[in-house]
Image: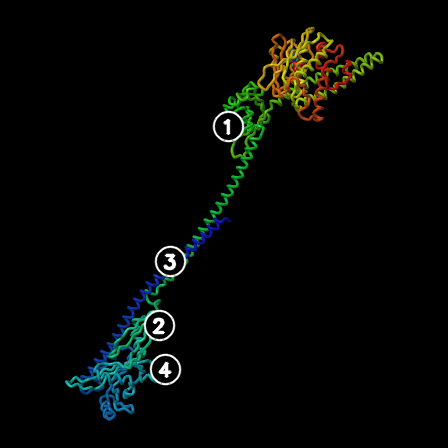
């Protein structure tokens, strides 16, 4: 894994983390905003509820107080108060549905001394069963004398009970008398409730309204006292406004400053909002405490924040996951792209290497390779192809190929038809091998014979096309032609000794004669068989010798030529007119001495051979004009000459000029001369000798050898046994051939005439060992 890929993966994870963090923060921010809005909403709702509750409590207490004052005013109207008056005056209280109200009573102040009279009076006024029960140890007593229960369940009214023994109502009564205004007592447990279990006892209080006469000089008569249970009162009042959502507590601030909870109302929930407001109750100011669970308040308890939080977190998670997938997916995609790119680069390097290798192979190949596409456009032509075909540029449309390349059939003259060209045949799906195409153009003026193989392009190349491989078979064809002629000549020459064998055999059968004649025939047969064997062996060796390695050295020409001339002249001595010859001063050359000797020997031998019968053989060796660094040697004679049409062809193997039939020969000597001169880089030619006869000339590289130097026979390179053997075989072959041509039987006309053959100088210049018996013929 590359550093870039790791970085991308980390970048993707970091991006996803950032998205998640951002999403969570945004969600929390929105939730916080919602919570704040909700809180504000719940505060408003709480305020509204608190105001409503406060107003309800105030209204209710005011109503109680007002009703009580009205009752007190009604009681004060009459001079003598009796039960009927009280009943009438308190009737509105009974029908008012006062919440928490227990009873309303008319309370009168009575001193201890007045108790009997007061009891009698109030019994007479309507409370017949009244029994005043004063608190001991006191002089001022407050006795309820009329009691009206406001809640039937509370049982009988508690008339006659001395309230002075209960501090809270007693204080309220006194305060009402003094202030002449309604008062409210501190909280306490009603006397009637003190018998109840502690859990059911409620903090209660009483309203006390003083009753004064309406005379000009008002007289205090007593109090109208309304007793209320705090818990019931609060529950009743708050029930309508809290709707089960508000906790309430009514706290009475007592005269001594102590605070007592009059009532508490609890609702389910976990209150988090609270309000405390003062409530004027008669001469006291109490406190109404309200609490509420904001979650339970309408409009404030929405689950929206939770939903938003949950939804936001889920969305954030999804978004983060999506980003992570996309980012890492991108990283994965990039990794795949990088991998593909790396593979492509490797493939490119490999294909470049392959292309380089292919190019090198194409350049190195000795065979020409040409590739064309389906339309015949040349896609590739290696240097060997261009060299073979002698062109520098590729051919255009196939129609122009014949002219562009100078393509002919193997005969060298018939223009190659397009449909016969191997590449065109290959484009048509045909495989061709060894199609011979002769190329002759400005770059190949002498022409070259090509063997061309054509193939349709392999489908793996990805396009339709064809490929052609061509090789130069000019030399091969020439060699084959030489070989064919050579074989013909050899076969022909083998017939001579065979004819000798057959002739002697027939002679021995038909007329054996004496023993000496028989022995003679048998010895001729054996010799002919030996010659045939030697001929076959040495002629094969001769063909190989054409390519024997050169041993180049500096050679002084003149001594070598004189030696050859003397040997040739000596060989002819006695068989006709004495040969004449002359040699001019000649430069030294760089050549293979043995090969050079062979050239000179052949040319001089021909000069002495091709003369008219009876004429004097003449040979003159002179130096001609040559290019710098080169020497030209000319061999002239006064012989029969060569007809012009033959001059160009006498250097071909086995070609003999017209008029030479009377002279022994194979037509091989000049071909060998040309081959040797060619191998030295020189040229050989023939022309008429101005004085009659023929003049051969050839060039060789000049050497820095003085004219006086003796012939340099030292080989330029070591001579192996094999090489020496080949050369010996070459010489033996020529000598043997000369001997064969010379060996004739009377009456056998298969061979050329005896006279010229006897002049064949080849037979006279033998260096190689030749069987002794050949000279016996
Ligand atoms: P060969 O002499 O065995 O026939 P060469 O290759 O030496 O073969 O010569 C080829 C032919 O050239 C001869 O057959 C002959 O017709 C002709 N020729 C060669 N040298 C001479 C010459 N000096 N004068 C006339 N004709 C010659």
- Judging depth in this view, the residue of 55 and 540 nearest the camera is 540
Q: Are marks 2 and 4 in contact (CB under 8 Å)?
A: no
513 with respect to 317 (left or right) = right
Q: Position of residue 313 (x, y in %)?
A: 41, 59
The residue wearing badge 1 is: 376
The residue wearing badge 4 is: 198
Q: Position of residue 634 (x, y in %)?
A: 62, 14
Instruction: Determine the secondary structure under disc 1.
Output: loop
Mark 3 neighbour density, 10 Å: few (under 14) some (14–19) many (20 or more): some
Instruction: Determine the secondary structure under disc 3.
Output: helix
Quarter of the image where ligand 1 sits: top right
- Judging depth in this view, the residue of 381 and 49 nearest the camera is 381
Would you place residue 266 above or below residue 358 in this image?
Answer: below
2 or 4: tag closer to the N-terminus: 4
The residue wearing badge 2 is: 267
1 or 3: tag closer to the N-terminus: 3
Q: CA distance from mark 3 to mark 2?
A: 36 Å
């Amino acid at each position: 894994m590359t550093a870039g890929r790791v970085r991308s993966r980390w970048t993707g994870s970091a991006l996803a983390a950032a998205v998640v963090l951002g999403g969570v923060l945004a969600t929390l921010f929105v939730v916080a905003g919602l919570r704040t809005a909700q809180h504000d909403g719940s505060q408003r709702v709480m305020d509204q509820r608190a105001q409503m509750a406060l107003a309800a409590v105030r209204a209710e207490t005011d109503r109680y107080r007002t009703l009580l004052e009205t009752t007190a005013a009604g009681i004060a109207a009459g001079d003598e108060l009796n039960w009927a008056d009280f009943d009438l005056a308190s009737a509105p209280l009974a029908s008012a549905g006062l919440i928490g109200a227990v009873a309303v009573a008319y309370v009168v102040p009575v001193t201890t001394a007045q108790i009997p009279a007061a009891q009698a009076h109030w019994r007479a006024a309507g409370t017949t069963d009244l029994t005043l029960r004063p608190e001991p140890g006191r002089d001022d007593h407050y006795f309820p004398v009329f009691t009206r229960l406001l809640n039937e369940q509370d049982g009988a009214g508690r008339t006659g009970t001395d309230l002075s023994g209960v501090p809270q109502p007693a204080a309220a009564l006194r305060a009402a008398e003094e202030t002449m205004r309604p008062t409210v007592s501190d909280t306490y447990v009603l006397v009637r409730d003190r018998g109840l279990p502690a859990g059911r006892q409620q903090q209660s209080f009483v309203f006390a309204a003083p009753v004064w006469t309406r005379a000009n000089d008002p007289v205090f008569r007593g109090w109208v006292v309304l007793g209320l249970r705090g818990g019931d009162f609060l529950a009743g009042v708050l029930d309508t406004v809290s709707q089960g959502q508000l906790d309430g507590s009514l706290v009475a601030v007592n005269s001594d400053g102590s605070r007592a909870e009059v009532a508490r109302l609890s609702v389910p929930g976990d209150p988090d909002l609270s309000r405390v407001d003062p409530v004027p109750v008669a001469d006291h100011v109490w406190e109404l405490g309200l609490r509420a669970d904001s979650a339970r308040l309408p409009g404030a308890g929405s689950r929206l924040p939770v939903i938003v939080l949950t939804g936001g977190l889920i969305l954030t998670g999804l978004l983060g996951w999506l980003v992570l997938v996309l980012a890492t997916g991108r990283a994965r995609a990039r990794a795949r792209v990088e991998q593909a790119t790396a593979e492509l680069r490797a493939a490119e390097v490999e294909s470049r290497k392959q292309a380089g290798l292919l190019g090198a192979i194409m350049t190195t190949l000795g065979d020409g390779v040409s590739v064309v596409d389906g339309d015949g456009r040349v896609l590739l032509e290696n240097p060997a192809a261009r060299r073979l075909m002698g062109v520098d540029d590729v051919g255009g449309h196939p129609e122009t190929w014949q002219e562009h390349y100078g393509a002919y059939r193997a005969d060298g003259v018939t223009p190659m038809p397009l449909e016969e060209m191997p590449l065109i045949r290959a484009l048509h799906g045909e495989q061709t091998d060894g199609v011979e195409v002769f190329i002759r153009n400005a770059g190949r003026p002498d022409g070259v014979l090509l063997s061309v193989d054509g193939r349709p392009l392999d489908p793996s190349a990805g396009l339709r096309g064809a490929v052609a491989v061509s090789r130069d078979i000019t030399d091969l064809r020439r060699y084959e032609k030489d070989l064919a002629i050579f074989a013909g000549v050899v076969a022909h020459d083998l017939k001579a000794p065979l004819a000798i064998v057959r002739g002697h055999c027939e002679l021995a059968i038909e007329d054996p004669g004496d023993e000496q004649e028989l022995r003679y025939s048998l010895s001729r047969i054996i010799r002919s068989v030996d010659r045939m064997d030697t001929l076959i062996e040495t002629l094969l060796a001769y063909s190989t010798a054409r390519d024997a390695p050169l041993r180049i050295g500096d050679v002084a020409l003149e001594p070598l030529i004189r030696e050859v001339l003397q040997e040739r002249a000596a060989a002819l001595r006695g068989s006709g007119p004495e040969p004449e010859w002359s040699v001019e001063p000649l430069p030294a050359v760089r050549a293979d001495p043995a090969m050079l000797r062979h050239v000179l020997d052949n040319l001089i031998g021909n000069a002495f051979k091709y003369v008219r019968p009876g004429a004097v053989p003449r040979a003159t060796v002179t130096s001609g004009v040559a290019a710098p660094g080169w020497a030209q040697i000319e061999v002239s004679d006064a012989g029969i000459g060569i007809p012009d049409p033959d001059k160009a062809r006498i250097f071909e193997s086995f070609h003999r000029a017209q008029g030479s039939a009377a002279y022994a020969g194979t037509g091989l000597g000049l071909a060998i001369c040309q081959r040797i001169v060619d191998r030295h880089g020189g040229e050989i030619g023939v022309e008429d000798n101005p004085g009659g006869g023929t003049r051969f000339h050839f060039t060789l590289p000049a050497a820095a050898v003085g004219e006086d130097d003796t012939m340099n026979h030292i080989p330029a390179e070591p001579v192996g046994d094999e090489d020496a053997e080949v050369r010996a075989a070459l010489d033996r072959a020529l000598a043997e051939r000369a001997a064969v041509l010379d060996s004739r039987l009377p009456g056998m006309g298969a061979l050329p005439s005896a006279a010229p053959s006897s002049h064949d100088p080849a037979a006279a210049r033998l260096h190689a060992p030749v069987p002794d018996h050949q000279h016996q013929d």
